[in-house]
Image: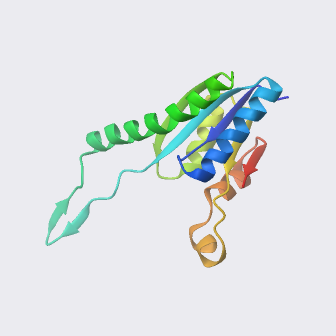
């Protein structure tokens, strides 16, 4: 059925439910996992009084993003190892996390995506959209949404 599941996580409690589900599914069907984290894009510099203020350099930001990714993904790979499920990890810095998730699934030859639905409702859902909704709309792979 499935051989390689991509599980997208941002380290949140709800993403943790998706991780737990992906590990259980992987164990049940004998699939390996690819845990993926899309770090937020580099913050835009602020302009004030004709001067450009950058909170950190791009190089420093990339280092901080890698540290965050390691922390988040290490937890996933530890849980997978404890359950006896093979797991590799990947991350990228992305302006559009949904695109990064789809790219990661393609690069890692995944055959399904497991992710959480953060459940925005009302006007925030209309204005902000949902990364999960965008993955569902654009994915050619099955997407398992965990609530």
Q: Is residue 26 left or right of residue 8?
A: right
| Residue 26 x %, y % | 75, 29
| Residue 60 x %, y % | 27, 41
Q: How is the image coloured?
A: rainbow
Residue drawn at 44 percent across, 34 percent down: 70
Q: Is residue 28 left or right of residue 92?
A: right
Residue drawn at 53 percent across, 34 percent down: 75
Q: Is residue 23 left or right of residue 101?
A: right
**Where 104 falls versus 12 (above or below)?**
above
Residue drawn at 65 percent across, 34 percent down: 106
| Residue 128 x %, y % | 56, 68
Could you say which quadrant of the image residue 36 lies in? Answer: top right
Q: Is residue 36 left or right of residue 43?
A: right
**Where 40 falls versus 72 (above or below)?**
below
Q: Residue furthest bottom?
A: 123
Nearest to the observer: residue 69 or residue 47 = 69
| Residue 55 x %, y % | 24, 55
Q: Residue furthest front?
A: 82
Could you say which quadrant of the image residue 78 lies in? Answer: top right
Could you say which quadrant of the image residue 19 lies in? Answer: top right
Name the quadrant of the N terminus: top right
């Amino acid at each position: 059925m499935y051989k390689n599941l991509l599980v997208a996580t941002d380290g949140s409690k709800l993403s943790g439910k998706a991780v737990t589900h992906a590990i259980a599914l992987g164990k049940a069907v004998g699939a390996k996992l690819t845990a993926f984290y899309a770090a937020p894009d580099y913050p835009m510099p602020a302009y004030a009084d004709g001067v450009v203020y950058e909170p950190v350099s791009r190089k420093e930001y990339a280092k901080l993003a890698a540290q965050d990714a390691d922390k988040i993904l290490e937890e996933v790979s530890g849980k997978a190892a404890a359950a006896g499920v093979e797991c590799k990890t990947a991350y990228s810095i992305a302006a559009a996390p949904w695109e990064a998730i789809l790219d990661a699934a393609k690069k890692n030859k995944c055959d399904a995506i497991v992710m959480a639905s953060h459940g925005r409702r009302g006007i925030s859902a209309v204005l902000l959209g949902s990364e999960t909704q965008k993955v569902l709309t654009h994915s050619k792979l099955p997407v398992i949404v965990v609530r």
